[in-house]
């Protein structure tokens, strides 16, 4: 039995395992978890460290602190690595490194989006259901990656699981807010699709433009010579191509123009007009190369995944999309731009100095 199953079983019965007057039961649970928790070989035991949740020597951590840490581990197993089906039973997420089971996975990172999420989900699911009826053999899943929201985002997404089944809509809830990039990465790593798209929860990009991305995707796959669809390729939506349709404020337009040049000069991502459009489609092979080593988890993560894709010689094609600025955004344009500029400079330095390894990207996909 794996530690995840033991923790889940423990979580379901923890009211019986932690009786207020029975310290021996608590000590037994701590001992079992201590023995089963894996540790790196040839390294000092982590349990000797006072900061470890199972450390008990010298009363440096109170019982409540230790049990809170154990509870956090159990809750992490329950939400970040499992999803609820319509009956409420929690099922483990698969891995992106397993064989694909669906034609397409749509990852939707969401943070406090209970108001804007329904509109986007209705549009997305209506389009995907129509594609299922139109294309024999087409199948899909939508993973809503709730980035530690404080509102009812997960509950709203779960209603779609009840309506469409957990085979089509899954809710991945992060315990703590990690950032949009962190939510996207976790969703991609749990994807079952042969192709993986991530898009914004506000519905700023018209979802039917997926047809344009898939057309370019199929052409690139044929050009690669991979008849089984196993090539590593990437198609991204762009708001800066000649036939793109964009509705945005003047402030965003000015900042975006300056940001484009900064990305090329500082971050080293060249030949791409729009790195920040939240509508990107990856083949499963490309996702397996790019996302596991992703470090940035905030707004600049798009730049890093494209930088990693270029390091790995993964072909990237831009496709014009229709994009509209949706009211209710929690993004401060000036603050986000400054933070992204800092993160991109830091990212480039880390890769150039070798602090962030790019050895896993030493492959040729052409």
Image (tube, rainbow, N blue to C red):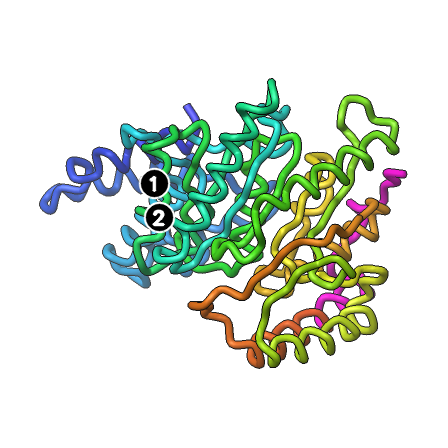
Near-viewer residue (13 or 204): 204
Say above or below: 354 vs 248.
above
**Can you identify the residue that label 1 sits on?**
158
Residue ID at (42%, 68%): 328
Q: Helix, strand, or loop for circle 2? A: helix
**Can you identify the residue that label 2 sits on?**
154
Say above or below: 114 vs 195.
below
Instruction: Give, as a single range, the part of the protein colored magenta.
Output: 346-366
Quadrant for the C terminus in the image: top right
Is residue 209 magenta-colored?
no
Q: Helix, strand, or loop for circle 1? A: helix
Say above or below: 360 vs 13.
below
Quadrant for the N terminus in the image: top left
Can you tell which quarter of the image residue 61 is in?
bottom left
Residue ID at (34%, 45%): 75
Mark 2–mark 1 distance (CA, rounded to whole Å) = 6 Å
Is residue 353 magenta-colored?
yes
The image shows residue 290 at horizontal and vertical percentages of 71, 46
The image shows residue 339 at horizontal and vertical percentages of 60, 75
The image shows residue 275 at horizontal and vertical percentages of 71, 61
Residue density around tag 2, few if under 14, some if 14–19, many if 20 or more, within 10 Å: many
Residue 319 shown left or right of residue 99 in the figure: right
Residue 249 shown left or right of residue 202 in the figure: right
Marks 1 and 2: in contact by CB < 8 Å?
yes
Residue ID at (34%, 32%): 163
Can you tell which quarter of the image residue 242 is in?
bottom right
Near-viewer residue (59 or 208): 208
């Amino acid at each position: 039995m794996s530690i995840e199953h033991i923790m889940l079983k423990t979580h379901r019965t923890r009211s019986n395992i932690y009786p207020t007057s029975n310290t021996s039961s608590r000590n037994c649970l701590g001992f079992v978890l201590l023995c089963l928790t894996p540790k790196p070989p040839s390294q000092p035991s982590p349990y000797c460290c006072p900061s470890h949740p199972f450390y008990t020597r010298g009363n440096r951590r109170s019982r409540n602190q230790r049990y809170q840490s154990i509870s956090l581990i159990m809750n992490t197993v329950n939400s970040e690595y499992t999803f609820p089906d319509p009956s409420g039973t929690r099922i483990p997420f698969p891995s992106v490194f397993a064989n694909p089971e669906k034609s397409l996975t749509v990852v939707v990172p969401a943070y406090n989006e209970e108001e804007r999420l329904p509109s986007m989900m209705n549009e997305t699911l209506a389009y995907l259901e129509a594609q299922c009826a139109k294309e024999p053999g087409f199948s899909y899943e939508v993973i809503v990656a709730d980035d530690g929201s404080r509102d009812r985002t997960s509950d709203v997404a779960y209603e779609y699981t009840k309506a469409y089944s957990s085979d089509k809509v899954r809710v991945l809830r992060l315990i703590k807010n990690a950032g949009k990039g962190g939510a996207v990465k976790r969703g991609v790593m749990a994807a079952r699709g042969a192709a993986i798209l991530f898009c914004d929860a506000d519905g700023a990009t018209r979802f039917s433009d997926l047809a344009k991305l898939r057309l370019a995707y199929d052409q690139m796959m044929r050009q690669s010579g991979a008849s089984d669809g196993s090539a590593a390729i990437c198609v991204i939506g762009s708001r800066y191509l000649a036939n793109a349709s964009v509705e945005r404020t003047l402030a965003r337009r000015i900042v975006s123009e300056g940001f484009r040049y900064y990305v090329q000069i500082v971050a080293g991502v060249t030949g791409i007009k729009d790195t920040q459009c939240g509508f990107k489609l990856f083949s499963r092979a490309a996702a397996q190369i790019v996302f596991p080593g992703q470090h940035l988890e905030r707004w600049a993560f798009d730049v890093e995944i494209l930088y990693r894709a270029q390091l790995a010689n993964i072909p990237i094609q831009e496709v014009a999309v229709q994009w509209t600025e949706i009211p209710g955004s929690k993004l401060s344009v000036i603050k986000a731009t400054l933070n992204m500029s800092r993160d991109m400079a830091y990212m480039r330095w880390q890769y150039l100095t070798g602090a962030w390894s790019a050895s896993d990207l030493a492959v040729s996909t052409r």
